[in-house]
Image (spheres, helix red, strand yellow):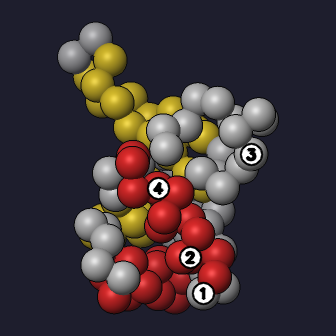
Amino acid sequence: MLASFDSTHDAMRAEQVGKAAGLKVRLIPTPETVRAGCGLSLRMPPEAAPAVAHMLEENGVKVSHWTLSATIDGSRQFLKKKSPLASKEKNNDLPG
């Protein structure tokens, strides 16, 4: 799962917040096929996305896009998703 940001400041703050909380997160260049935000994304396991989203919201870090990556037919695909904090009735396809 990737979280993309409009500003480099938000991206760096997101990594800082996630690591301080002991979550498995890493700042990476945003893949070209995602084409979102400042060029940096926070990578995390899909099951960690709800906890990361909650912590970022609590710390005032704005995520511009959530993207789930998956290997489909042998190639990496990126599927845009709603925030992991969206209600389950509206967003049943997200893990967590």
Query: Dividing the picture into quarters, in which one does residue 42 lie?
Result: bottom left
Q: Secondary structure at mark 2?
A: helix
Residue at the left extreme of this rendering: 74
Q: Which residue is mark 2?
A: 56
Give the amino acid type for the residue marked by disc 4 in the picture: Ala
CB under 8 Å between callouts 2 and 1? yes
Seen from the viewer's position, the closer of residues 89 and 72 is 89
Mark whose residue sits in front, 3 or 4? 3
Q: Residues within 10 Å of mark 1 (few under 14, many from 20)?
A: few
Per the image, the residue denoted by label 3 is 87
Q: Is residue 9 left or right of residue 27?
A: right
Q: CA distance from mark 1 to mark 4?
A: 15 Å
Between 31 and 69, the residue placed more toward the observer is 69
Q: Residue 93: image x %, image y %?
A: 58, 29
Residue 36 higher or lower than 11, as above or below: above
| Mark before the other along the chain sequence, 3 or 4 | 4
Marker disc for residue 90: none
Reading the image, the residue beneath label 1 is 59
Res. 5 in view? yes
